[in-house]
Image: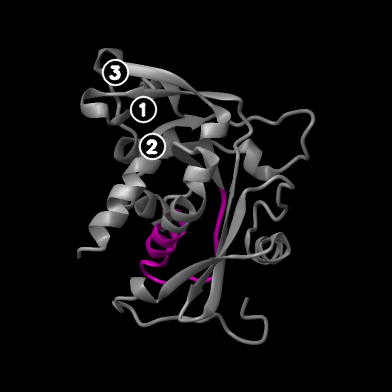
Amino acid sequence: MHADGEPFTAPLGLRFAEHVTVDPVPRETAAAIYKAHHSYMDSLPSVNIVHHSVRFQGNLVGAITYRYPLISKKRIRYRTGGQLAPQPVTIEEDLPRELRPTARRILDEIDPNQIVDDEVVAGDTLVEAARICLGVRMPNLASAALARSQERFVADTADREGTRFLLTWVRADYDGAMIRALRDKGWTCTGFAEPSEASNREDKAIRKRWKWRFLCPIEQVKEQSTLDSWT
């Protein structure tokens, strides 16, 4: 992206969601974007479902990749009304001091009695947005890019793959636009992952960091897409 000049920018306040588009691209294209702009994870897993390019008025500004997560099963918790519930957690006891301010904003501290149902879902019914990479900084770009990409994935792929939930992770020390974008587009922070480094995986700095876990039901994406078509 912008290899021959300065990064593309747009005027502050421009309503540009309709100018953001996504399209499937080859793995090689997505890998090149991540290598250039994804500072903490430049490699790309070999097993993926689809890669999206993100463009603003035809200018390449990022990429998003979807894959099955590296888990075989996942417990999903629900509160009243079928809403996703976070894992029961005591923020003051379970999280480092520096993460607590963000946790209080994005992670509900609920009593186990507020969880009215749960289920264990197979890993192949979850799809992870394993890379969300934007190579330029523009107001609202993260939200618009995520909206277009998840709608495109649901329209093209989700039913065929039997997907029920989208999953993604956000670095816990990153308190930026992507967290706001996820919440705006129907994602719920359902917990966190402590730093861990598997012995059979390449050493990466990102694996030594705490991360927030976000989930979004596929049906919620479909509902939002329907509502957007009437606004």
Q: CA distance from mark 1 to mark 3?
A: 9 Å
Residue under the image location 65 percent in, 58 percent down: 39
Residue 115's disc number: 3
| CB within 8 Å, label 2 to label 1 | yes
Q: Is residue 193 visible?
A: yes
Q: Residue at x 21, y 27 (%)?
A: 81
Asked where in the image residue 132 lies, by quadrant, the reply is bottom right
Query: Hey, what amino acid is under mark 3?
Result: Ile
Q: Residue furthest front?
A: 160
Mark closer to the chain start, 2 or 1: 1
| Rendered location of residue 36, percent (x, y) | 68, 66
The vertical placement of 106 against 41, above or below, is above
Q: 93 above or below 49? A: above
Residue situated in front as seen by the camera: 185 or 120: 120
Which residue is under mark 2?
A: 189
Instruction: Give x and y (percent) for residue 38.
Output: 63, 59
Point out the tag, 2 or 3, that comes first from the N-terminus: 3
Instruction: Name the one closer to the observer, 167 or 42.
Output: 167
Residue type at numbered disc 2: Cys
Q: Are marks 2 and 3 in contact (CB under 8 Å)?
A: no
Q: Nearer the viewer, residue 122 or 76?
A: 122
Furthest-bottom residue in this view:
5
Looking at the image, the residue that sits furthest to the top is 113
The spot of residue 79 in percent (x, y) is 26, 24
User: Residues in magenta?
Assistant: 130-150
The 10 Å Cα crowd at callout 2, few under 14, some 14 to 19, many 20 or more, is many
Binning the other alpha carbons within 10 Å of mark 3 as few (below 14), some (14 to 19) or many (20 upward) gives some
Specify whether 28 is left or right of 123.
right
Which residue is at the front of the view, 125 or 54?
Answer: 125
Question: Which quadrant is home to the C terminus?
Answer: bottom left
Label 2 element class = strand
Residue 55, how many percent across, how many down? 50, 73
